[in-house]
Image (spheres, rainbow, N blue to C red):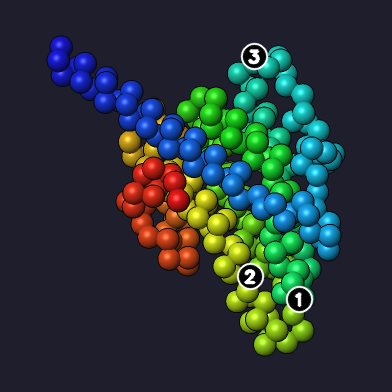
Amino acid sequence: MTRKRATRSWSCSAGARAARSLSIAAGLAFALIPATARSDPDFDTPDPGLVVIPARCAQFWTIPGGVESPAAWDQLMSFATCTQDTTVGWVDDTSELPGLVAAMHLALVPSIQMWVAGIDHGPTRIKLVAAYHLALAHADLIVRARRSIAATSPTQARVLRDRLEPMLSRSAYIAWVMFSAIGRAAADDPDVPSDVVSRGMIASSRSYAAALAKSFSLGTDDDESVRLAAP
């Protein structure tokens, strides 16, 4: 009797810790939206309150069976991913870099809001999906920002890249924290799904976390910063 109660208590506690870690890490994503994104007169920043729905995403706008349907969370996650901004800019002057990064952060807000809702309120499988795509979006932001450099010479490209990299550290950090939290949740929470897709996301998360830690000198997923999901 005592052993069973202890096991059940540990499982519930582990699941709660994993969910809390994902929720706190997801909340950090909102801190990555610089105020300059709203005030930079030289960069066209989107208004997160006005979202244009691409035609290809319309299929996810309605939920068969209503919001209480088992498919509701899947539809929301599909919609968030489908409408995720994937814009690549064009920057050939260092003065334009802050506006570029700020605009990219701001454009992710609508999708981030849906992913955070999934992490906070969805079932375990949805928490995993939402956390993975939120992390992946920030990792993708790094790639898109680097691709936005439009240099006419190797020297100019190096200058732009050197100035850009420190501006990407916050995106790298939140992606690393989220990917690491997924790996820890999979290890700590027995309720984390073990299907092929989920195992693929977990393995990918661990690989991304390791790569980001190496590229941005972020440490390891055993660090206390990952454990608490706080900078």
> Which residue is at a point 64% across and 40% down the rendered structure image?
112
Q: Amino acid at mark 2?
A: Leu
Report if residue 202 is visible in the image.
no
Q: Is residue 132 above or below residue 121?
A: below
Identify the residue under disc 2.
164
Q: Earlier in the sequence, mark 2 or mark 1?
A: 1
Q: Nearer the viewer, mark 3 or mark 1?
A: 1
Badge 3: few (under 14), some or many (20 or more) residues near its Cα, within 10 Å? Answer: few
Q: Amino acid at mark 1?
A: Asp
Badge 2: few (under 14), some or many (20 or more) residues near its Cα, within 10 Å? Answer: many
Query: Considering depth in this image, is 204 or 116 the residue closer to the camera?
Result: 116
Measured as percent of width and height from the top left, residue 19 is found at 44, 31
**Residue 153 lies in quadrant:** bottom right
Query: Considering depth in this image, is 24 or 22 the residue closer to the camera?
Result: 24
Identify the residue under disc 3.
68
Q: Earlier in the sequence, mark 3 or mark 2?
A: 3
